[in-house]
Structures are given as C-alpha cells and as structure tokens.
Image (cartoon, rainbow, N blue to C red):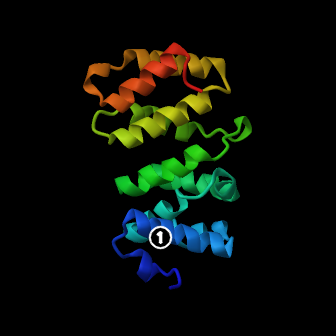
Amino acid sequence: MAITSERLKQTFSEGGAQEIYREIKAKGDFLSFAQQYVFNSDYRVARNALWGLTKCTDEELSKLHVILNELIDQAMQTENSSVRRLTLNIIERLTLQEDNLRTDFLDFCFEHMVSIEELPGIQTLCMKLAYRMCTFYPELMDELKRTLEAMEIDYYKPAIKCLHKRILSGRYK
C-alpha cells in the first residue's frame, strides 16, 4: 500500500509506524517523504509521518539536516503537542552546529524545559537540546546551570528530575 496523506490520517499503532518506516527505507528518499508529509497542516498526517521517521537510524535521519530550520520552526509554532514532541525528537537526533545556532530556538527550549504545564517528554527534549546548544558557549552553559538550579525540581516528573541532576552533576553526555 502506497504512503498517502489519506493513509497517514489513519490511527496508527507502533506496528503501523514501523511499516511506514520500512516503506520509506525501501524507497530510500527520507527527505522527499519528510518534505511532503511532516509539515502537513493536518496534524494526524504530520504526526504519523514524524512517528515513522523516528524509527530511522541516525544516519538515515541525517539526510533531513537540510530542513533543520523548517523542523525547528515547526517545533516552535505547532499547537499540537504530539507533533511538537516528535519533531523535537528528530531535531535532537540531528547534528547541531555552532555556526547555525538559533537563539530563538534556544529561548524556546529554555522556556519549555521549565514550564510546569509542558508535557514531560517535551520538557526533557528541550532540556537536552538546550544543553547541546549551550555547550558551544561557556556563558550560555552558565546560564543553563543557573536556570536549572532555580527550578523547583520537586514539582517535576522523575524523567525531568533525573536529567536535571545529570546535567548539573556533569554526568550528561
């Protein structure tokens, strides 16, 4: 069965996401697939396309680096938390470079990693991405550590607490 917008609107299970991934892999055109479906205005199409792409290897995902800015824009602008989380998951697996650091995205990550209202998966991904971006500049790393130290960590879920502790103790990556 070919991948279409109509097919991607359906409710998917883990097996469905794996099947989409296998079909993308067979065609070997991860970038065209992403450009066609990941930014779709129907959140179900975008979510299921992203879910299929999360099954890719890091090498396969590296082909999406040319649309990194579009992925960042989507993560910051979407109102759908599933699309945001899956997009952040893909961004987190791509290479971030010092020369194309986006301060608007860093600010977004800082804001969402500390937001009690944000979902834990998004908080965690934002904390990881903020850490990676801050490693390029010691003054930003100091700001990240000050922000983490100011968090009232008792109000957060265990995943956030664990990552928070690992970053502050120097045991994260």
Q: Looking at the image, is 1 positioned above or below residue 66?
A: below
State the image quarter where residue 95 is shown: top right
State the image quarter where residue 28 is shown: bottom right
x, y (%) of residue 60? 67, 58
The residue under the point 46% across, 49% down is: 76
The residue under the point 70% across, 39% down is: 97
Direction from residue 21 to residue 100 in the image, left or right = right
Q: In the orientation shown, which residue stands out farthest toward the bottom?
A: 1
x, y (%) of residue 57? 62, 54
State the image quarter where residue 172 is shown: top right
Compare residues 55 and 156 and report the one nearer the observer.
55
Which part of the image, by quadrant, shows the C terminus? top right
x, y (%) of residue 1? 50, 85
Helix, strand or loop at label 1? It is loop
Compare residues 20 and 104 and report the one nearer the observer.
20
Compare residues 67 and 170 and report the one nearer the observer.
170
Residue assigned mark 1: 40
Can residue 79 be seen?
Answer: no
Q: Looking at the image, is 155 positioned above or below residue 118?
A: above
Neighbourhood count class around disc 1 (C-alpha, 10 Å): few under 14, some 14–19, many 20 upward: some
Q: What residue type is labelled 1?
A: Asn
